[in-house]
Image (cartoon, grey):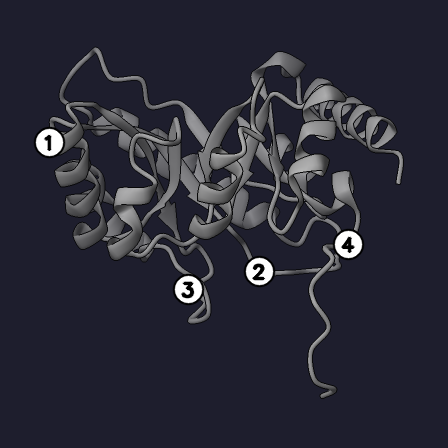
Amino acid sequence: MDLTQNVRAVQEKIAAAARAAGREPGEIALCAATKVQTDETIRAAIAAGIRLCGENRVQELTAHLGTDAYAGAEVHFIGHLQTNKVKQVVGNVSLIHSVDSTRLLQAVELQADKLGIVQDILLEVNTAREESKGGCMPENLPALAEQAMKCPHVRLRGLMAIPPVSTLSGSNRKYFAQMRHFLVDIIGKMSDNYSVVDCLSMGMSGDYEDAIAEGATLVRVGTALFGPRPYPAGPAR
């Protein structure tokens, strides 16, 4: 695996997708999804030009923070977050992508209040209504967004989605377009003129170019950078 070459290739594809959509490449942030990666691989990715790392698991986030593996990069939490692990995440990442319920929102607000900080968050939307995935249902998004904007220690920055896994090119564009409409709707209903709600986190290794075409401002890429994840071998199925 040539990590430097992979980073460059993904950056070039992001730039090409942006230009094809009439956008500036600088409008899209590349978040390296570092799930199951080692400290050494994360450091190598940062040395290769990665400036934003996204962690899926609280245990891995804590371990990498302990070894200063993210030095030189911003860190986001992009995975499912349980309320009992909020204390390990709030204040340790610049953005939480996966707030999807009132209960989790209140837990983040409480912990941020205790720390005396304002925690940036995204609201995760289950666009395809998949039972196996997190995210609030689309019809519940307006109310959750309203609640988030009333929290003094939480700053709503935008939305996140993980559409269905698909091998068909373009099949997720309808979900990405739906997310763009959700974001525009939330911005239109905001009651103030100082909040910055402009982040649309969507698109992964197999579909980030389609996501950019539909308005993504941040793409979360793992496999295209690091190759297939080295999951430990399990029992035969």
Which tag, 4 or 2, sits closer to the chain's start? 2
Say whether disc 2 or disc 1 marks the residue closer to the N-terminus.
1
Sequence-first tag of 4 and 3: 3
Q: How crowded is mark 3: few (under 14 residues within 10 Å), some or many (20 or more)?
A: some
The residue carrying mark 3 is 129
Question: What residue is shown at x 36% (from left), y 31% (from top)?
Answer: 92
Residue 1: image quadrant is: top right
- Using the numbered discs, state the Cα–Cα distance from disc 3 to disc 2 in whole angstroms: 9 Å
- Comparing labels 1 and 4, the label whose residue is closer to the camera: 4
For residue 150, the mark is: 1
At label 2, which amino acid type do we have? Pro
User: Compared to 84, does 52 lie above or below?
Assistant: above
Q: What residue type is labelled 4?
A: Pro
- Residue wearing tag 2: 164
Is 44 or 49 nearer to us in this picture?
44
Residue 1 in the figure: left or right of residue 133: right
Report the mark closest to the observer, 1 or 3: 1
Question: Is the Cβ of the residue at disc 2 closer than 8 Å to that at disc 1?
Answer: no
Q: Which residue position holds label 4?
A: 228
Q: Going from the N terminus, do you reach mark 3 or mark 2 first?
A: 3
The answer to whether any part of residue 215 appears in the image is: no
Mark 2 vs mark 1, CA separation in Å:
31 Å
